[in-house]
Image (cartoon, rainbow, N blue to C red):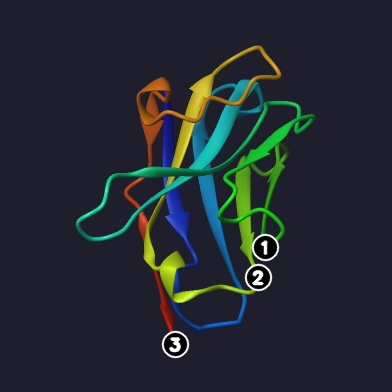
Amino acid sequence: QVQLVESGGGLVQAGGSLRVSCAASGRAFSSYTMAWFRQAPGKEREFVVGITWSAGNTYYAESVKGRFTISRDNAKNTVYLQMNSVKPEDTAVYYCAAVSLNSDYVPQLYYNYDYWGQGTQVTVSS
């Protein structure tokens, strides 16, 4: 069982930067593949980026590639999402997700993940 708590969301101007964090509690965090999803009003939840348990592999959605960076600190049970050059279309609730997966594959579908945080709002003003 893993509990996930996101933090760090807020209001940022277009072109600016923001870092959101996801703190995990529970056992064996280092064995979980972690991901960030986001959901804007009236839209479906979409995959943003994921990172394997060893941090050996990452996968980014095309819409954020080159602007967002995911990282993890297994000693702190925390995964981070650094968002640079943000755009108004990045406005959404950002969710952290986890799945126990001994693989270098990063799932991109929400139903592949077993654990979810409550979400943190990120709003980008133009």
Name the kind of residue labelled 2 in the image. Asn
Quote the CA–CA distance across marks 2 and 3.
Answer: 15 Å
Q: Quadrant of the C terminus?
A: bottom left
Return the residue nearer the eye: 54 or 108: 108
Q: Residue under circle 1?
A: 67
Please give the label number shown on residue 84. Answer: 2
Q: Residue at x 23, y 60 (%)?
A: 41
What residue sits right under mark 3 in the picture? 126
Q: Which mark is residue 20?
A: none
**Residue farthest top in this picture:** 102
Tag 2 near tag 3, CB within 8 Å? no
Residue at x 39% of width, y 23% of height:
114
Task: Residue 121: tell me if it is visible.
Answer: no
User: As shown in the figure, which amino acid type bears the numbered disc 1?
Assistant: Arg
Q: Is residue 44 left or right of residue 57?
A: left
Q: Is residue 20 above or below residue 55?
A: below
Q: How many residues crowd around disc 3 within 10 Å: few (fewer than 14), some, or many (20 or more)?
A: few
